[in-house]
Amino acid sequence: MIAVTGATGQLGRLVIQSLLAKMPASQIIAVVRNPARAADLAQAGVQVRQGDYTQPDSLISAFQGVEKVLLISSSELGQRTAQHKHVIQAAKQAGVSLLAYTSLLHADRSPLGLAAEHQATEALLKESGVPFVLLRNGWYTENYLASIPPALQHGAFIGSAAEGRIASAARADYAEAAAVVLTLDDQVGKVYELAGDTSYTLAEFAAELSKQAGKTIPYVNMPEADYKAALEGAGLPAPIADLLADSDTGASKGGLFDDQHQLSQLIGRPTTPLAASMKAALA
Ligand SMILES: NC(=O)c1ccc[n+]([C@@H]2O[C@H](COP(=O)([O-])OP(=O)(O)OC[C@H]3O[C@@H](n4cnc5c(N)ncnc54)[C@H](OP(=O)(O)O)[C@@H]3O)[C@@H](O)[C@H]2O)c1
């Protein structure tokens, strides 16, 4: 039995899809905080169990009889270390043989502010004695694709990543890697640095966008504070604007780059290229 937390999230749904291609639905448990949002998963034959990262007892029930757990990091920034601790404790109580955790690329030395909660979770995993594997995920290409509509509207793609190269991959690539690791033997203690096979600067991203959209969209690099203010001006909540601007600065220091190709090695195919993801987004 393999349990996937955050299974109604974007990554979680893709992991379940990948697992369904590898094993019987009856051996997959979708742990979700709101089962009403998982009717389609139940329809596919997956066991749906309620589990909230803030409610330890719900996680202990959800993990009964579970052999392996995928802990998909919470989206509730600032609350994540405490929430993840509950998941780790419940997995320990269930005696799981493997807990896979979606961490951040090079979490131990990442310049991104986002790394702090992942470092804390990795430390909790080490202390817990639970057998674990780290899936240190790089950037989802989708993060930058989300900025395409405003870029087209304003005629410029803005950011703070300067010349930093970004080795992103599609969310579905990371999901497939998680499904592979969950279904392989001998994963305890491994640390995967997962990133796209190819990388780009944001100027190159804007050039590809210009090519595909058929109009010139230059990349405009900004100081982090100005980029954050522009994002807030566009209506993003301050903490999200802060996170995105800080992550771009991290990218400018190489924080989103990796060229080890561990992701494509795990999934047995090249990662989804930027041009393909962008084409799908524009369509
Ligand atoms: N590598 C990257 O580029 C990148 C980008 C964004 C995020 N991330 C990280 O990767 C994770 C997965 O990404 P995603 O795109 O799938 O994000 P997402 O769609 O926001 O999914 C987050 C999942 O966390 C669940 N969750 C949040 N709080 C919870 C709680 N208290 N109890 C139980 N579940 C809770 C959500 O449940 P509901 O379905 O009920 O909302 C959702 O399923 C994110 O949460 C974040 O930590 C990585």
Image (tube, grey):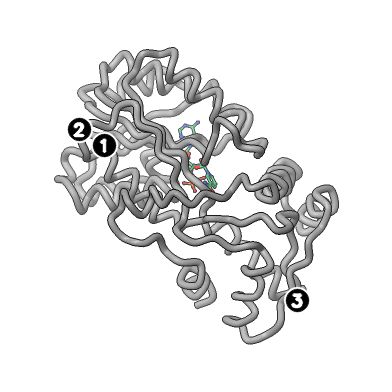
Q: Nearer the viewer, residue 58 or 266?
A: 266
Asked if 212 appears above or below 111 in the picture, the reply is below
Location of residue 129 (image quadrant): top left
Q: What element carries label 1?
A: strand
Residue at numbered disc 3: 155
**Residue at figure coordinates x 29%, y 24% from the top left:** 63
Of the residues shown, which amino acid type is indicated by label 2? Met
Residue 1 shows which numbered tag?
2
Residue 62, how many percent across, how many down? 31, 26
CA gap between label 1 and label 3 equals 45 Å
Of the residues shown, which amino acid type is indicated by label 3? Gly
Report whether residue 72 is seen.
Answer: yes
**Residue at figure coordinates x 40%, y 13% from the top left:** 128
Of the residues shown, which amino acid type is indicated by label 1? Ile
From this viewpoint, which residue is outermost toward the bottom?
214
Residue 29 shows which numbered tag?
1
Location of residue 98 (image quadrant): top left
Q: Nearer the viewer, residue 14 or 265?
A: 265
Asked if 272 appears above or below 9 in the picture, the reply is below
Residue 269, how many percent across, how many down? 31, 60
Location of residue 82 (image quadrant): top right
From the viewer's perspective, is 91 left or right of 215? left
From the viewer's perspective, is 221 left or right of 66? right
Q: Is mark 2 on a helix, strand or loop?
A: loop
Q: Are marks 2 and 1 in contact (CB under 8 Å)?
A: yes
Residue 160, how many percent across, how many down? 75, 54
**Residue at figure coordinates x 66%, y 38% from the top left:** 111
